[in-house]
Image (tube, rainbow, N blue to C red):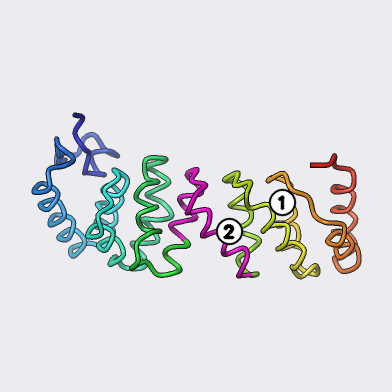
Amino acid sequence: MEPVRVSLWEYLDEKNGNSTTIADPEDHAARTALCGMFEEESRQDAHDGAEWADFMLADGWQPDGYVREILSLTDEALRHLLSEQFALLGRSAAPGLLAVVRHPGTNAQVRFEAAQAAVWLGETGEAADVLIKAVETDSGLAPATASQLARGRVERAVPVVARALEQCDMRDPVAVTALSDALRELGGRPTEDTLSRIEREAPDWLARTLLQDWRSAPPS
């Protein structure tokens, strides 16, 4: 069985000589020892602790104890972990992100940020559900979140994005443009009522552009 990598430093810098591996992923004693190492790293330096947390979760280590350690990181370290480190590791980080999303100790903001990162990595299941819920319930988050769902090709978000566009403040060109673009990228189409609202309420220059784009587009 291929050893489990547990040192992000080894992964990023082959010259680092402090790597540690666990040959058997089911070796609970070794995992317990590693968790102790992680806790010590977290106490000494929040950033280093985030790197340990990053790699353990990226390897799919999802027991509650590890996730609780992730959630105990400082806000700065946690944001570094969610915004930078997971993206660096790529698709292999998705199981760890989903563990954070699922964990009952995760607060709403952290769950949302972990879900964003997971969708960015290609997850379209429960992580996408978190973002879809945000589009449904938070008009302030809806435009940017809809754009993330579009980049992640979460096509089942079409009805929610269409409704968000229908209900948004048409006087806000940033929101209207973001929601309209997201809906188009997802393969959806606004209702005629929505287009009528855009025509009546959006700034003239924006209304002209969007109406021309939508009414000249082939049916989806």
* Mark number displayed over residue 132: 2
Magenta stretch: give its range. Answer: 113-138
The x, y position of residue 71, in whole percent, is 31, 65
Image location (x, y in percent) of residue 124: 52, 47
What residue appears at the point 10 percent right and 46 percent down from the top-left corner? 30
Estimate the x, y position of residue 175 in percent, counting from the top left: 71, 63
Judging depth in this view, the residue of 188 and 110 nearest the camera is 188
Label 1 belongs to which residue? 183
Quadrant of residue 152 within the rendered picture:
top right
- x then y, percent, for residue 95: 36, 47
- Tell me the mark number nearer the camera, choosing from 2 and 1: 2
What secondary structure characterizes most of the magenta part?
Answer: helix
Element type at marker 2? Answer: helix
In the picture, the quarter occupied by the C terminus is: top right
Residue type, numbered disc 2: Ile
Nearer to the camera, 81 or 12:
81
